[in-house]
Amino acid sequence: MSLLGLGIDIGGTRIKGICMDEEGRVLAEADAATGNGSCEEEVLGNLFTVIDSLLAAGEVASIGIGCAGPVDPILQIAAVSPNIAFPRDYPLGRVVERRYGIPTLIENDVKAAALGELYFGQGLRVRDFVLVTLGTGIGGAIVHEGKLLRGAGNAAGEIGHLTLERFGPQCGCGKQGCYEALASGTAIRRSFLYALGRGRHSKLASLPTEEINAVRIAEAAREGDRLALEVFEVSAFYTGLALSCLVGLLNPQRIILGGGMSAALDLMWEKIQDTLTLHTMDYPLRQVEVLPSDLGNRAGVLGAAMMSIRTIIGRV
Ligand SMILES: [Zn+2]
């Protein structure tokens, strides 16, 4: 009988999991709220609930976990998790391994998603690509010659924290003017609310502030709301600029755009392409193809599961 691997994705709001066989077939899925951002036990309890329900699918021999924030895959430590209630340098891999007696690997969530693209998505048969995840924050991961590019501390690819404006808005990382602070879903909402506060007109102006988010703003933009279109265009400009840096530095064959905000790429596509064309040298520009992920929000769990199967079960 085929041995099975679990793939888990711990995000700021949901914990998602799948059970996969060695051929990459998904046999079961589970998901739960991540839980209280300041209560480690609650997050762990929810993680264990997801794992428990997946274990019923068969003989599980490996667990792979993608976790937001810097992760040390050698020490199996989640270094700092800004949106998840784990203490600094939390030995997440060992905690799970000890509870279940199943070998466990952890990886940064965006790097796990890049593995998902490499094994199952737009990265199949592509040696050099970059995944950029556009959402509440902006993440990135680089695959070079068919492998994750890790850097000295597994932090290579943190595209969201490239400084694109010297005196730009404050970023969650402590710097100013990061790409993420200029273009993420959070940045789109902030710019939109700022403009409303300064008296700009929008069809969303009558809504309570807490009901205004990037999804609502995208809907308004599709209905022709000028302000909503403008904030998406500004975000798209910075994405084009960030991609031009990636193309110049890495000469990738593909750039894959994923994350929740990639559902609004229709609003941003033209501006991204125009900006990329304007700011990139011709030679590497001709070689790169920019395209949306087709794995939706499953890239992370698929990558985490196959990472654990290949590394731990090692038969594929
Ligand atoms: Zn930053």
Image: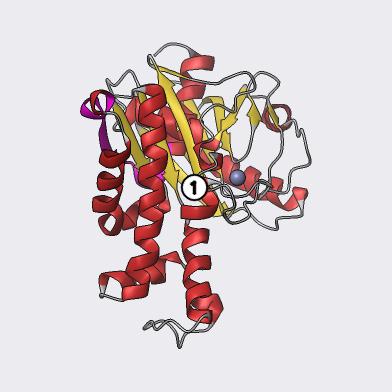
Q: Is residue 241 something that shows in the picture?
A: yes
Place of residue 112 in the rendered image (x, y in percent of width and height, measured from the top left):
49, 31
Helix, strand or loop for disc 1: strand
Place of residue 111 in the rendered image (x, y in percent of width and height, measured from the top left):
50, 31
Q: Is residue 177 magenta?
A: no
Residue in front for this viewpoint, 52 or 233:
233
Q: Is residue 124 left or right of residue 308?
A: left
The residue shown at (35%, 42%) is: 257
Crowd class of label 1 (few under 14; some 14 to 19; many from 20; radius 10 Å) = some
Residue in front for this viewpoint, 168 or 42:
168
Q: Say which quarter of the image contains residue 152.
A: top right
Q: Say which quarter of the image contains residue 121.
A: top left
Read off the magenta span. 284-299
Residue in front for this viewpoint, 196 or 167:
167
Mark 1 C-beta to ligand 1 under 8 Å: no
Place of residue 43 in the rendered image (x, y in percent of width and height, measured from the top left):
69, 49
The residue shown at (68%, 28%) is: 93
Q: Residue furthest top?
A: 315
Q: Is residue 125 left or right of residue 69?
A: left
- List the residue tagged with mark 1: 30
Instruction: Locate the N terminus by quadrant.
Output: top left
Q: Is residue 57 something that shows in the picture?
A: no
The residue shown at (28%, 41%) is: 278
